[in-house]
Image: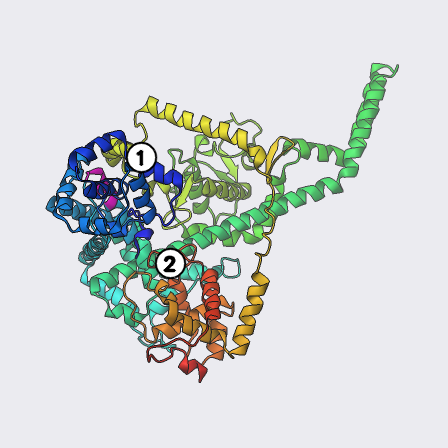
Amino acid sequence: MQPSDTAYPRFKSRLSQTELERFYTPSDTERVFCNSTARSSTTRLGFVLLLKTYQRLGYFVASNQVPNAIIEHIAATIGEHCDQSNLRQYDISQARRKHLSAVRNFLTVKPFSDDGKALMRQTFIEAALTKEDVIDIINIGIETLVRHRYELPAFDTLVREARVQRVAANQVLHAQIYDGLTDAGRLFLDKLFVVGNDPRRVSPWNDLKQDAAKPTVDGMRDLLARYDSLTDLSCHTYLLKTIPIVKIKQWALEGNSLDAASMVDMSAAKRYAVALSLIQQRLAHVTDDLCDIFCKQMKRVLHCAEEALERYLKDNQEKTDEILRRFAMLETLLNSNQSATEQLQGIRQTVTARPDLCEFSRLHVEYGGKNECRFVWHFFKPRRATMLRILIKLKMVATSQDVGFERSLAFMLEHRHRHSEWFMLKSNGKAALTSNDLAWIPEKWWKLVTGETQREAILTRINHRQFEVCVCSQMVRELKSGDLCVIGSDAYSDHRDELVPMEECERTRADYGEKVGLPVETTAFIAHVRTMLMTAAQQADKTYHDNPYFKIIDGRPKLGRQEKKPTPPGFKQLDEALTRKLDSLELSLLDVLADTLQWIGWGKHFGPLSGHQGKLQEEDRRKILTVFAYGTGLGPTQIAKNIADVSQCAPGIFRQSAPSHDGKTGGRYLYRDQCVQSISTTALLGRHKARGGRRHPMESVRK
């Protein structure tokens, strides 16, 4: 881990003149303080250098660690000669030690003493309970020390203490879970790592880590079976309720990359915590898949109903035209000079001559004209059993005070086996409905479900079929909007569970507002946010003309596609040079990966998800194979078929810990393709470099 991975202050490698003048030019007050403290011309430059670098970094550094551009700028500003030898003498002089205290007093900061260490340790203890990444823990510690006006310690001190407290915090959480388990619960979890009598010679832990079936209707039976098995295993996951989400996710990732033997080698407390986390995560993923299947199927049903409505209107276009023609005939008849009796007889004959037109008009008016809802049941019926099986498994709860839809869902599931066309609202079952519970029904469904045209009517019954379809279609909207949550889900979970408790908000509100620079009083906060939004809106109005991809068409904003970036200059020549170099030296890509692994050490970017030291055998060889498998697009299956002594899961284990755009190991962000490209480009330097007598990691593959 490097300081650049955290918020630890450091010098920029390149400084502009504006930055030098802004950050490293002493003010008039500082000049007066410098002249009164460092009266000798030989120490004045060193003193100002101490002052300005501390203001920028928060800790003191020797002059040889300061970029020359800063030294030269400060020397020119105060009119002193830039003499590196004098600065080196100043770094070891007694005057510098005295100046350190003077700078601290001038800036009202405190040295990193025992009190500072205690503050840092306590901060890390609290942060490690809610954070898993060492970088996040270090950043919180830096922020706390700066806020309390403490000098920052060495970066290695922060790293060591953060790792120690993270381990201690995890051990506390592991012990908490361990103590919550009974002997029967521990024995239950230990059975996951025993092969037993399975003819496949694999443990239940291996089955637990396998990916679930694809979220399709064909794979739904397997998903439901997996949901049942995971539900049986999750009988102890209630112990994770007090554990932060970030910890559970990290433990689940770590457990997913370990086999049963590695899990057994763990301490018992950590093993149970990792096992329960993975069970909860897998169950959440399966629950999400079931919800996705339900939503996709209902969307398909509604789409088919819309197409059926279009066909219905198209097929009955002749009837529509005939109705309009007869309406025109009625207008002509009413404007004629015939008597009222003759007009009435003509009207009766015109209307009753085509009974099919009367029926078509009645249905059209009764069900709201272009209403696709009356066609939904026809397409829902083949999927009804599938939809209800999913709903029976899932536990859904309303996230608002309006529980009418939740009660309607329970009522529908309770009466799913009944065959009568109409349900009485006041049933003898556990679930009963009132008219207020049905207020959520959309207008276009009201006539179909209730048989009434007016919403103010007192309801006593509802249509069985149409009520089921209406509930299922409405549930998709409820899930997408978050008004309905699924217990045990991840994507459809209750967002309120992740909110900070109101008591803690009240206690920490003022401190939070001070940290982020926001007013916490109601009126001041509204005014502040309104000002920010107005400023952003005005800035957008001024600059959107300069965006070539943003256009307003017919009063609506549109974003165009970005143009493909041109091939960088020299790319073709580089590719040809690389090809010639490899061909002339008779090198393969595996040779390049093996050599560059030793030259530039790109393997340090790969490691276990937990951040601990890797324990794999032939680690370098597996790193090379992983980069080769995914960098070339072959994948683990083809690698296992073409290289001896390599299983399909070998590259997969490292893939889970490889750096990518959505994960990080060792504090470095890297794209796999960029990693492979940079490694390949290094081969242009040649391969004939000393290996220090080390055995080539790909020697067995070559053979």
**Residue 185 appears anywhere in the view:** no
**464 and 624: which is toward the camera:** 624
Looking at the rendering, the stretch of residues picked out in magenta corresponds to 142-149
Q: Which element carries disc 2, helix, strand or loop?
A: helix
Q: Residue at x 19, y 38 (%)?
A: 148
Is residue 301 toward the left or the right of residue 157 in the image? right
Is residue 130 toward the left or the right of residue 685 in the image? left
Query: How far apart, in angstroms, are the residues tagged by discs 1 and 2?
Result: 37 Å
* Depicted 367 relative to depicted 286: above or below: above
Q: Position of residue 53 (x, y in %)?
A: 26, 43
Q: Amino acid at mark 2?
A: Arg
Classified by dominant secondary structure, the portion drawn in magenta counts as helix
* Depicted 138 relative to depicted 557: above or below: below
Q: Residue at x 43, y 52 (%)?
A: 288
Q: Residue at x 19, y 34 (%)?
A: 35
**396 and 263: which is toward the camera:** 263
Is residue 52 toward the left or the right of residue 477 in the image? left
Q: Residue at x 58, y 68 (%)?
A: 576
Q: Which residue is mark 1?
A: 516
Q: Amino acid at mark 1?
A: Val
Q: Tell me which corner region of the image, top left, top right, bottom left or bottom right, holds residue 46.
A: top left
Q: Which residue is mark 2?
A: 282
Q: Tell me which corner region of the image, top left, top right, bottom left or bottom right, holds residue 405.
A: top left
Q: Tell me which corner region of the image, top left, top right, bottom left or bottom right, holds residue 668.
A: bottom left
Mark 1 or 2, nearer chain start: 2
